[in-house]
Image (spheres, coloured by chain):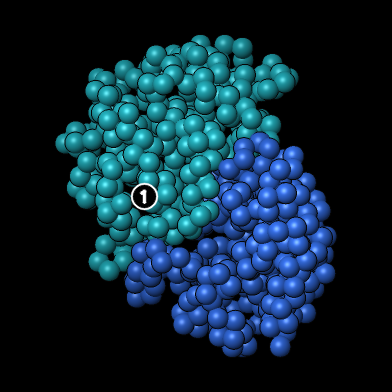
Chain colours: A blue, B cyan
Amino acid sequence: MNFASKVKTYSSKVNLCIGLDPVWEKLPEHIRKSEQPLLEFCSEIIDKTKDIAVSYKPNLAFFEAFGSKGWDQLKKIVSLIPDNCIVIADGKRGDIGSTAVAYAASIYQNLACDAATVNPYLGGDSIEPFLQNPAKGAFILTLTTNPGGSDLQGLICEGEPLYIHVVRLARKLNKSGNAGLVVGATKTKLWQKILETAVDMPLLIPGIGAQGGDIDELKSELSGYSSTAFVNASRSIIYASSKRDFGDRARIEASKLFERFQA
Amino acid sequence: MNFASKVKTYSSKVNLCIGLDPVWEKLPEHIRKSEQPLLEFCSEIIDKTKDIAVSYKPNLAFFEAFGSKGWDQLKKIVSLIPDNCIVIADGKRGDIGSTAVAYAASIYQNLACDAATVNPYLGGDSIEPFLQNPAKGAFILTLTTNPGGSDLQGLICEGEPLYIHVVRLARKLNKSGNAGLVVGATKTKLWQKILETAVDMPLLIPGIGAQGGDIDELKSELSGYSSTAFVNASRSIIYASSKRDFGDRARIEASKLFERFQA
């Protein structure tokens, strides 16, 4: 199935994506003692939430930090996610020509993820290798949630903020309907022009929960938008408890969010 | 030793950095048959050139493409590079807060590299974790060599090209003298304003050799600049031969470049 069609299988406009960010210090103690702690932790989160979330977003940094062992566990984790979910490898890669091809191979073939997050600073030819296969998709960083995000993204370039130029670039690259945008939930006030320009590209939205993005504002901004949004929550779900009940507590938090998205 | 002092140990203005980009299809046949092909290949390149190059730049994509096995070999390769050389992990990472901290830990602690390449699109707070330890340095992508580089980098933002804003941001972050810039050799015509603004930050310069950057132009532009440049060549050195003599041929090509830098 191509990526655009897979995105269309989700009938909701606002869908839950769970971020898999296994930060060592935050893992429950009994998990830290196990042989494959990242795998143990993430597999329980997936098992308890896979009928609620439609997407998972492993953050590559937290696996890379464990070197080859982290990479091995990540590969096993991806294989545990049901096929009807979209797995977004959050690595924010961006490099030229053959290097971008190697990153795309790493994410789409070696790890078997459905999608990647990519950084636009190196321009269109650094993103194209992530869009070449219509079965795979790329979410292009547009407007990020961090305070420093505005250092460059908010600069007015030839009459428009830099992030609007990114949206236009994404539109140009979106020949197979498999390009999306990363747009932070903490900056909904800036969304109107982004959504107008994006027309129908799927969105990956970080920044609710621990980062403070408002769900009602987000839903109201998206009400007239024609494509699908994957709204990511990580910490508020996966670290709802630091004890043995972390999986059950993650399920409760995921359900609450799901209900707020549907309401 | 802190990073700024280590950079100053190189008395030349223009220094050779060898890019370790082990692209599978280009590896000599006998290497492809070995058990740890990336390690075999890179260790011979390092062994034959370590008295000529002062820096090596492993490109993380080509190791990641082999999953955990690639990561293991990369770690061994880094440990083979002499301590007086600077090892630059070329991963072009860029992410927010705790994620950037994890990437920095992966590169500086797990892999034990001296420096990283980082992407500025997410702003200052995404770069700071790479500069926190004065013993380690970060080269910030400024002006890249690829055709698409100008899609965003060349936009005029509030009176100046975007890449000049990046240089100013880098200056602001350079509190420990460990921030550098990545500036492509194919675009020397745009360097003047960059170097004026950079004042004294070290440069990592890709784009000579296979990519067509002119060495004489590069040297002439750098003649009045007060810091050190690491000029990277990958393919023209490491793939000078696809046979058993690839190490010796790499040495010959590295020597030729070294002499042109010194001339």
Figure quadrant of residue A50: bottom right
Check the picture and name the quadrant holding the N terminus of chain B: top left
- Residue A171 placed where, x, y %? 56, 69
At 56% from the left and 62% from the top, the residue drawn is: A140
Q: Is residue B219 visible?
A: yes
Frontmost residue, A26 versus B226: A26
- Residue A42 placed where, x, y %? 73, 54
At 58% from the left and 43% from the top, the residue drawn is: A65
Left or right: residue B94 compared with residue A102: left
Query: Which chain's residue wears label 1?
Result: B
Residue bearing mark 1: B142
Q: Is residue B76 above or below residue A169?
A: above
Element carrying mark 1: strand
Figure quadrant of residue A127: bottom right
Left or right: residue A14 compared with residue B2: right
At 49% from the left and 51% from the top, the residue drawn is: B100
Q: Is residue A123 visible?
A: no
Frontmost residue, A25 versus A186: A25
At 75% from the left and 76% from the top, the residue drawn is: A255
Left or right: residue B262 compared with residue A29: left
| Amino acid type assigned to the residue bearing label 1 in the image | Thr
- Residue B135 placed where, x, y %? 36, 35
Q: Is residue A215 above or below residue B89?
A: below
Left or right: residue A243 compared with residue B185: right
Check the picture and name the quadrant holding the C terminus of chain B: top left
Frontmost residue, B180 versus A254: A254
Query: Callout 1: few (<14), some (14-19), or many (20+) C-alpha neighbours within 10 Å?
Result: many
